[in-house]
Each structure stands twice: as C-alpha cells, then as structure tokens.
Image: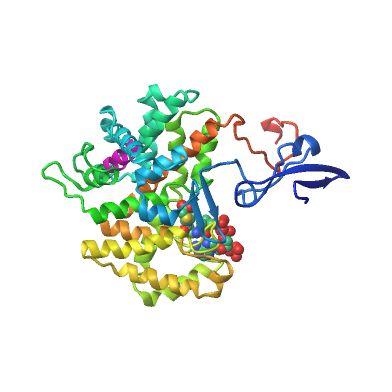
Amino acid sequence: MGGSSATVTLNGNQVSCPVRSGSVGPDVIDIRKLYAQTGAFTFDPGFTSTASCDSAITYIDGDEGVLLHRGYPIGQLAEHSSFMEVSYLLLNGELPSKDVLDKFSGTISRHTMLHEQLATFYRGFRRDAHPMAIMCGVVGALSAFYHDSTDITDPHQRMVASHRLIAKMPTIAAMAYKYSVGQPFLYPRNDLSYTGNFLRMTFGVPAEDYYVNPVVERALDRIFILHADHEQNASTSTVRLAGSSGANPFACIAAGIACLWGPAHGGANEAALNMLREIGTPDRIPHYIERAKNKDDPFRLMGFGHRVYKNYDPRATVMQSTVREVFEALNVSDPVFEVALQLEHMALNDPYFIEKKLFPNVDFYSGVILSAIGFPTTMFTALFALARTVGWVAQWNEMISDPEQKIGRPRQLYTGPAQRDYVPVDKR
Ligand code: CMC
C-alpha cells in the first residue's frame, strides 16, 4: 500500500484505490470503484475494518481510550459542560456563547410537551411493558403527529424535528415510567433545567412540589453527556441506514432505539446491574469470572469489553467517580458497588481479560448510579436512548446534508443454491 493509494491485485488485474486521510485517526482505503473495476466485493460483516461514512462529529481512539466531541475531550465536557451545551455542540459544531446557549435551551424547553393525543396512545400498552418497547412505539408514532417537520429536504424542518426529538424524549421516557407504576403523567416545567425537568416528571407527583437535588441533577446531566454520541456505533449506523432511504426522522430514531435495546449495546447497563446483583457478594466473583472465560458458557461480563476501546473506556472513569458523589449526596450505599469495584479489579488482573484487552465500558457503573437515584433497571436503557437522541439526530443531519449521500445498500457473499427449476409438489 502506498502513501496515497492501495493496490488490489485480482485475477492478474491491478486496481489502484485512493487512500484518504481524516484530520486524526487511521486512513481509509476508498474502494467505491472496486466492484466496477474488478467485479469483486469486499467482505466485512460486523464492519470491523470498514468506515461507513465520513463524519466531523465524534472521534474515538480506542487504543488510547480517547473520546472527542467536535474535538473536545469527553472528560472536560463531563466536568465543565452541561448536556444542553454538549447537545448544541454536537448539532452545530461549535460551543455556543452564553446568549446562544440560553436561546437553544429555551427552544428545547418549548418543545417538551407531547401532543395530548399521545397520552391515550400509552394506555394501549400493558402496564408491565418494557419502557424500551414503549419508547420504540411512541417515538415512531411521533411521525403521525408532527407532519410539519418531516420534509427532510428542508433544513429548517430537519432542525425543528431534531429539537422536537431532543426535547420530547425526557417526556416520553418519564411517561413510560409513570405508566408502569400507575401514577399520573406530569407535564413538563420550563423553569427547570433539561435534566431537572426530567427528574421531576419521573419522580414528582401532582399532589406536592418536587425538590430537584442539585447533586443528583448534575450527576444525571453528566450521565447524559457521557451517552450523547459515540460515532458510528450500531444504533447510530441504524439511524443513518434508515435515514438513507429518505425515511422521516421520527421513524429513523425509533429504529435507533430498537437497535440500542439489545444487550450487546445499550441494553448492557440493565444487564450489568442485574449481573452485579446476581453475583451479590465479592466471594462469588471468581465463579463468574470463570464462567465469562469458559467458551462453552454463553455468559459474558456485562459492562465489559468494547468493539473500539482496547483500553479503559474514558466514560467509565467519570462514571466511577460519579457513583461516589451520588452516594454521598443521597447518603446511601449499595453493596453492589463494592462487588463492581472488586470484579473490575479481579478481571483487570486476569490474563484472559488482559490478553483480550477487555476493560469496563460506560455501562459497568452507570446502573449503580441510576439505581441509587431511584430508577428501576428497566428504565436504564431508556435513559441511554434519551441521551443518545442528540447524537442520532446530529449524525442523521450530517448525513442528509451531505451532497454525496446515497441509500445505504450493502452487498453479500451468496452461499445459497444456484439457479434451479421449480418442481411441482406431486413430483417432490
Ligand atoms: N466477557 C467475556 N469475554 C468477552 C467479553 C465479555 N464481556 N467481551 C468480549 N469477550 C471476548 C469474546 O469472547 C472474544 O473472545 P475470542 O476472541 O476468544 O472469541 C473476544 O473477547 C472479542 O470479543 P468479540 O465479541 O469478538 O468483540 P466485539 O467487538 O464483537 O464485541 C462487545 C464487543 C461490546 C459486544 C462485547 O465486548 C460484549 O459482548 N460485551 C458485553 C456487553 C456490553 O457490555 N456491551 C456494552 C458495550 S459499550 C456501550 C454500548 O455500545 O452500548
């Protein structure tokens, strides 16, 4: 491979593919003309060596454990920024001035209410429905309510849809929770912060005032920042693929929510806390580590390992310190945290995990915090979806505004029968 091109030799034919460089990170070999020139496809199920797009939003260096949003390190954003500011940054590319941020936050606040008809939509679900099932359904249904922001060729409508999705997601998630516990829905309050409003809609009741604990509000806001975007992960790629056909943004985000639900992705936070509770006490950890290493046992350490990070997930570092902050503020403790700390310590000293470069990911500690705040485990992935919505809409907008955008249409290596003739049923 040369500095600016790579050569593929196939059946005696030599084809030169240009090599493109980004601002940082690995180069990519541009193989868009490969099929036309050679008649062969590349084969990369799971996309382990494939860049599906170019993007200026988020950068990850998995070996070094670096995560940047528009160039800013996640640790700095988690410490100094707010979820609203990070949302603006992801959507628009630059940090806002104070006035611009106030205006953006005000715009989001004014989109937090849901069409009243949607409340009746909830009543069609069983009370024990998983909140992610409700989220998939209700977010998809938004396309039936907000027709004035579904023309994807109009940048203004795209931005209105983006604001609506970011604004309505806390209301939708809080209502899913309220429905499951049989309490009345609470309308949003625009005098509260994005996260404070969500806490009140979730844990408040109409019968009394709700006090937003500032430490909890800050901790949850930070959790939202940590989940806001993560370049071309499975759910974001799903949103892009759905959007590449021209589908409306509400339908695309519903597709992203469906993908996020799986335990290998956003569902891992729920699975991780369930696993830690099942382990229960530190003396049982070695048994679970052995199970995770056993190839004949499907069990995996949930909240461990990552496709991109082969080092400590920088989000897990912030998460771990946030656990202590929340415990102190709420004056609570949870034996599960000790189990998590010891499990991490044992795994990081075990040759299996060292060799495979398996470290705690964002989901390992998040459940401990969310549980201390009072969320049931079934809500964890819904919170992930809430926070990731801004990343999804930023990536979707970036794709739609790209003049080179095409429908996403992977090919395959066909392994089924070659053409054969139909045999009538009485002759088989
Ligand atoms: N416990 C035990 N072994 C593991 C684990 C784990 N958590 N993760 C990976 N491995 C092993 C795996 O068995 C494989 O071994 P071998 O090479 O001998 O076959 C090797 O490590 C590589 O794993 P992989 O499944 O080929 O890697 P992947 O990049 O396809 O999968 C992953 C990444 C995140 C799906 C996987 O690490 C996993 O299942 N982790 C547990 C679920 C989890 O915590 N998911 C959250 C990811 S972060 C947040 C998000 O994306 O939503």
| Residue at the farthest right position | 12
Q: Is residue 213 magenta?
A: no
Q: Position of residue 416 (x, y in %)?
A: 70, 42
Residue drawn at (44%, 38%), measured in percent from left and top?
Answer: 91
Q: Position of residue 211 (x, y in %)?
A: 17, 50
Q: Position of residue 315 (x, y in %)?
A: 43, 58
* Chief secondary structure of the magenta portion: helix
Residue drawn at (74%, 36%), measured in percent from left and top?
Answer: 33
Whether residue 298 is visible here, answered yes or no, is no
Q: Nearer the viewer, residue 327 or 298?
A: 327
Q: Is residue 168 magenta?
A: yes
Magenta stretch, residue numbers: 167-176
Q: Nearer the viewer, residue 168 or 315?
A: 315
Up/down of 175 relative to 275, above or below: above
Q: Quadrant of the C terminus?
A: top right
Q: Nearer the viewer, residue 26 or 359?
A: 26
Q: Position of residue 366 (x, y in %)?
A: 37, 58
Whether residue 226 is visible here, answered yes or no, is yes
